[in-house]
Image (cartoon, rainbow, N blue to C red):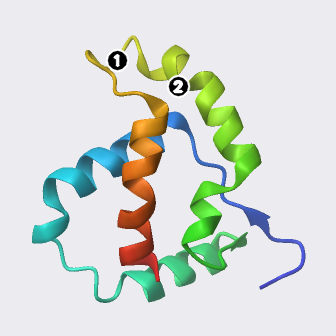
Amino acid sequence: MDPDSQKCPLRARDYYDLWRVLGAFQDRLDFSDFPEFLRSKCTVRNVSFEGPDDFFEKTMLNHVEKTWEQWLGPLIPDLPNFATVIDELRPRIALIAS
């Protein structure tokens, strides 16, 4: 990967959307080509991606946690706790992005 590439900045809504979609439809989606697709897309956008842990970089998660209620609270009734979403999302992302 290009040394000038950056990590992909994810927002609270990105984590929430992934959690909802994967929680509801993961068993009905075909992810067989997803790892290659993700790497190709990251290359085109000059974003580094080494593996599933890149989705959960500590600095990024700290920012998302701080903005969770602010960005999602007004949009989502019964917003789940940030920690719950991240804890359930980690193994799902690991499964499809490896």
Q: Give the amino acid at mark 2.
A: Trp
Distance between the alpha carbons at the discs numbered 2 and 1 = 11 Å
Helix, strand or loop status at disc 1: loop
Seen as rendered, the residue at the extreme right is 3
| Label 1 sits on residue | 75
Q: Residue, x 36% and y 51% (percent of image)?
A: 88
Binning the other alpha carbons within 10 Å of mark 2 as few (below 14), some (14 to 19) or many (20 upward) gives: many
Asked whether 35 or 19 is in front, the reply is 19
Q: Residue, x 26% and y 45% (percent of image)?
A: 20
Asked whether 49 or 23 is in front, the reply is 23
Residue 78 on image: x %, y %: 26, 17
Residue 52 on image: x %, y %: 54, 71
Helix, strand or loop status at disc 2: helix
Q: Quadrant of residue 46?
A: bottom right
Residue 22 on image: x %, y %: 26, 57
Instruction: Identify whether 90 is placed above or below 96.
Output: above
Binning the other alpha carbons within 10 Å of mark 1 as few (below 14), some (14 to 19) or many (20 upward) gives: few
N-term mark: 2 or 1: 2
Judge from the rendering whether residue 96 lies leftward or rightward of residue 56; answer left or right. Answer: left
Q: Residue, x 69% and y 56% (percent of image)?
A: 57
Residue 96 on image: x %, y %: 36, 76
Asked whether disc 2 touches disc 1, contact meaning CB atoms under 8 Å apart, the reply is no
Instruction: Identify whether 95 is placed above or below 26.
Output: below
Judge from the rendering whether residue 65 lies leftward or rightward of residue 30; answer left or right. Answer: right
| Label 2 sits on residue | 68
Q: Give the amino acid at mark 1.
A: Leu
Q: Residue, x 65% and y 75% (percent of image)?
A: 49
Q: Quadrant of residue 33?
A: bottom left
